[in-house]
Image (cartoon, rainbow, N blue to C red):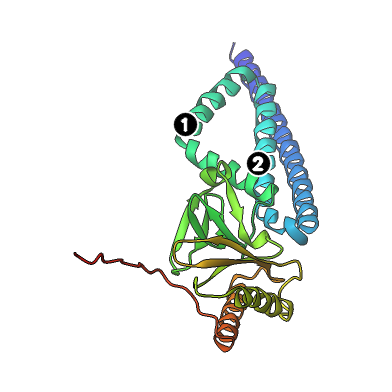
Amino acid sequence: MINEIYDFSDKVEKLLTALKIKFIFELIIVFIIGVVCFKLIDMFDTHLKAKLSSGKNSPLTRFVPILSNIFKGLAVFFLLASFLQSHGYSMSSLIAGFGITGLAVGFAAQKTIANVFGTLGILSDHSYQLGDYISVNGHEGTVEEINMRSTKIRSMDNSVIILPNDIVSGTIIKNISAMKRRRIFETFGVTYDTNDEKLKRAVSILEEILASNSDIHKDFIVYVETLSASSIDIKVSAYTKTNVYAKYLKIKENVILEAVRRFREEGIDFAFPSTTVYIAKGE
């Protein structure tokens, strides 16, 4: 009887030893497959970064590590699920457990996920990039940072405006830096006392100023627009060759200063808002 007990315990011990060896061997195989998968994902990461690092696609490189981490997470999940299933665990129960957990996390991170997809939309559409001057929902400024949650722009008063990317991607974006040229659209009002000759001369002066300016395209238009309440209005429509805002302002300033100087030389008076009052004499 005692010998039988010893024989049985010896068999159990051998069986457990065999199971342990099998378990360890399978664990090593899973680990090796995991390492190979991680190496392949890292190679994909490096290749994709090199491909996207030039030109307009360069901002997309910051999302390559995120894709790599997602792929690595999926690899770990499937390897772990396969290993557990081979040892008698139910795959459907495991997936259901992950599903419930994912649902809870999804609700908690709904806003964050929306911002991430908004960021991907902005960068994939090339809506704007770092250094661009944009206008979104009445906010204007230079793009200083595009991260996973928001876009940071610096306004003209030097304040920083933070715009959530899910809102930005779902609204109208005006990329002012994308303009190939900027428009000068100014009105020069002269007095009603200006005679026909001086009025025509005023138009000619403005045309000469624009034609002689090397920073302005030659497809400009100068014309008498309308008779307003206090002036005869001459309209100037011209385009600068630069789209840089600071340079555009300087070109516009030069045009206006030269117009003022030339009008004064020719004796052409600028109009200003005025009111004529007639007083009736009593009998």
The x and y percentages for residue 241 are: 72, 71
Type of the residue with mark 2 = Ile
Q: Which residue corresponds to mark 1?
A: 107
Decide: is 102 above or below 151: above
The x and y percentages for residue 106 are: 51, 32
Query: Is label 2 in a helix, a strand or a loop?
Result: helix
Count up the numbered dots.
2
Type of the residue with mark 1 = Phe
Q: Find the residue positioned furthest to the bottom.
A: 265
Quadrant for residue 158, please give it: bottom left
* Residue 53 visible, this angle: no
13 vs 26, left or right, is left
Mark in the foreground, 1 or 2: 1
Q: Find the residue positioned furthest to the top.
A: 1
The x and y percentages for residue 134 are: 57, 58
User: Which comes before the other along the chain, label 1 or label 2?
Assistant: 2
Decide: is 208 above or below 84: below
Q: Which residue corresponds to mark 2?
A: 70
Viewer-proximal residue, 19 or 224? 224
